Amino acid sequence: MKTPNLIYIEMLARNAGEILRAGYEKTHQVEYKSTIDPVTEIDRQAEEFLLKEILDKFPDHHILAEESGIIEGNHDHIWYIDPLDGTVNYAHGIPIFSVSIAYAYKNDLKLATVYDPMRDELFSASRGQGATMNGKPLSASNERELERSLLVTGFPYDMWETANDNLKDYGKFAKLTQGVRRLGSAALDLCYVAAGRFEGFWEQTLQPWDVAGGGLIAEEAGAKVTDINGEENYLSPPISILAAPPILYEKMIKVLNEK
């Protein structure tokens, strides 16, 4: 196998999800990467499993993983690995978290899967082939009006210390829509846009492994996905994200760029 296929990365996500499910609601060894950014031993166990499996089959591939950082390899083949997206939820026993895996060839995202082990929902996409959830096709919402839209967002881990805390934009959209939720897993937020559960998602100050998998899934479900400035390469630092069906996307980016 010179390059991965969708069945392979789906298998990886399901198996890593089993590690998360087995450790759920147990006592965890929680450490902090910053004031409010935790990591547990389960994050590391799931990531160790994924890295071993990938490097056994693709030893020369380049990997960006949340806990291990950069594993140098051939930059034509890049993996984006988040073994547990939603660690704060997980550590508190809140069943909203996921495994996110994406693969890019020559800087173009090709394959993605995001697995929610608590709901057994496997979101997947292959470039140009559409997106699915447990094998059923996904389609972004056909809502056209902000006031009838339900949005989702997230906030940065350094919000105690930064002016770029997303609170102003949250306030704007809270007054223009049916509501704005915060689930705590950017990967699932994007998949829920793909599934039409949310009309749109935006967030600032992210990492590539947060959005690579869900971004491709949302794109393949018909959402427009860029950074919050409208740049198509949303994996290019500084990383932010905006995902919504095209008509609502234009309305959301207008709001985000209001002074």
Image (cartoon, helix red, strand yellow):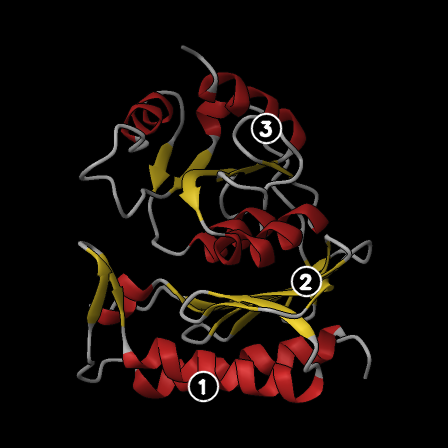
User: On the image, numbered disc 1 is attached to which residue?
Assistant: 18
Front residue of this view, candidates 113 and 130: 113
Residue 187 circle label: none
Q: Is residue 60 above or below residue 131?
A: below
Q: Mark 1: which amino acid?
A: Glu
Q: Mark 3: which amino acid?
A: Tyr
User: On the image, numbered disc 3 is attached to which residue?
Assistant: 249
Question: Who comes first in sequence, dot 1 or dot 2?
Answer: 1
Q: Are marks 2 and 3 in contact (CB under 8 Å)?
A: no
Q: Which mark lies nearer to you, 1 or 2?
A: 1
- Give how far across and how far down residue 91 sits, in percent: 23, 70
Disc 2 is placed on an element classified as strand
Q: In this view, does 218 lie above or below 131?
A: above
Give the residue drawn at x 59%, y 28%: 249
Q: Quadrant of the C terminus?
A: top left
Front residue of this view, candidates 179 and 159: 159
